[in-house]
Amino acid sequence: MSQIKIFGVDKKLIPIREKLSSVIHSCVMDALGMPENKRAHRFMPMEKENFFMPGGRTDAYTIIEISMIEGRTSETKKKLIRLLFDRIQEQVGISHMDLEICIHESPACNWGFRGMHGDEIKLNYDINV
């Protein structure tokens, strides 16, 4: 299980959100083995005056926050981050400098979906990858 939030300047983020979502999901499928139908993305376009960013960034600056059930290895998470950096730059045009990624993990018992606790549901994909 994963939930992904994407933050960016509205005028830059809104026109690319469908393409960016597709690229992000391709990375999640390839790195984490998520099924095609398990896309849960939330776009958070912000007015530029409400989106402070570090120096050296452009209006394309984008933050991706990934919340997921713990269980993936460090190598798997690093693979996901690398795929996101490279595919987003190649396919969407956001430079590595304008992209920040953070993975937040929590135990399955802290999740609830489909009316059940996350540690009680049988998923159709493995999280211990």
Image: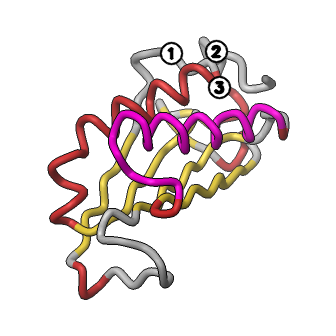
Which residue is at 24% across, 80% downward?
48
Task: Compare marks 1 and 2 and give the one earlier in the sequence.
Answer: 1
Callout 1–callout 2 Cβ contact below 8 Å: yes
Q: Secondary structure at mark 2?
A: loop
Q: Is residue 91 magenta?
A: yes
Q: Main secondary structure of the magenta part?
A: helix
| On screen, residue 64 above or below 18 | below
Horizontal and vertical percent position of residue 66: 56, 49
Residue situated in front as seen by the camera: 53 or 89? 89
Tell me if label 2 and label 3 are in contact, CB under 8 Å: yes
**Residue lying at the far top of the rendered structure:** 124
Give the mark nearest the N terminus, 2 or 3. Answer: 3
Three-letter code, disc 2: Tyr
Height in image: 34 above or below 115? Answer: above
Q: Which residues are magenta?
A: 75-96
The residue carrying mark 1 is 35
Q: Quadrant of the N terminus?
A: top right
Q: Which residue is mark 3?
A: 32
Q: CA distance from mark 3 to mark 1?
A: 9 Å
| Quadrant of the image occupied by residue 68 | top right
Give the numbered dot on residue 125: 2
Residue 126 spot, x, y in % from top left: 71, 18
